Image: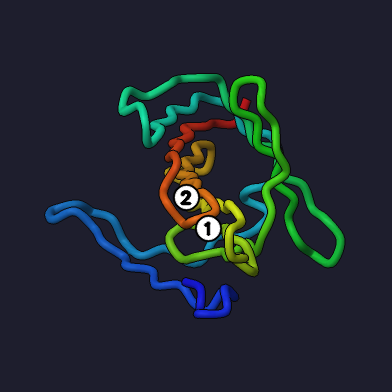
Amino acid sequence: MHDSAGALNGLVLIREFRAGSVAVEQPPLQAASLLGDWRGEAATINADWPEPDSAPAAIQVQSAAGGELSLQITIGLHSEQAQGRLLLLPDGGYHLSPLQVSHRQPFSVQAGWLASPGRLQCLIRRFDGSGAWQSSTQLRLQRP
């Protein structure tokens, strides 16, 4: 994903379908499909505690300057503005990661997909300044 200088270099998307399913390849996600409010539950597993912590979750997606999208993520009482480059992917997916990963700076990456027009699922992985995994959060959201 990132080159030796820490810049976002590329992404590999492996498209898989369950054997015997009727799933078919879908076109890339459209920004308009993400816009608005999403609410649901988050389950977080931390490196030092394997039992998941559950909390209410929400994502607010808005249009920003230059055609970009702004994601405000709230898990429990913690709220943060998602930072980085948002790539819209085939089959209703997206990827969000920093443009640059700096030495000794914590960072996170996010993958999300529309399971259906009104259901959004996300996986957020957080890493510390040494690059060691800290936690993973799965969000299961729907439109209110």
User: How far across and down, in percent of the image, does residue 125 sit?
Assistant: 46, 47
* Dot 2 alpha-carbon crowd within 10 angstroms: few under 14, some 14 to 19, many 20 or more: many
- Which residue is at 31% across, 28% downward? 50
In this rendered view, identify the residue nearer to me: 139 or 78: 78
**Alpha carbon of mark 1 to alpha carbon of mark 2: how far?**
6 Å
Evaluate if marks 1 and 2 touch, with contact meaning CB atoms under 8 Å apart.
Answer: yes
- Which residue is at 53% across, 25% downward? 40
User: How far across and down, in percent of the image, does residue 3 sit?
Assistant: 50, 79
- Amino acid type shown at disc 2: Trp
Q: Quadrant of residue 104?
A: bottom right
Disc with the residue nearer the chain's start (1 vs 2): 1
In this rendered view, identify the residue nearer to me: 98 or 6: 6
Q: Quadrant of residue 13?
A: bottom left
- Which residue is at 37% across, 36% downward? 47
- Amino acid type shown at disc 1: Tyr
Q: Which residue is mark 1?
A: 94
Callout 1: helix, strand or loop? strand
* Dot 1 alpha-carbon crowd within 10 angstroms: few under 14, some 14 to 19, many 20 or more: many
Query: Outermost residue, right direction?
Result: 65
Tell me: residue 19, above or below residue 67: above
User: How far across and down, in percent of the image, does residue 81 sit?
Assistant: 72, 43
Q: Tag on residue 113?
A: 2
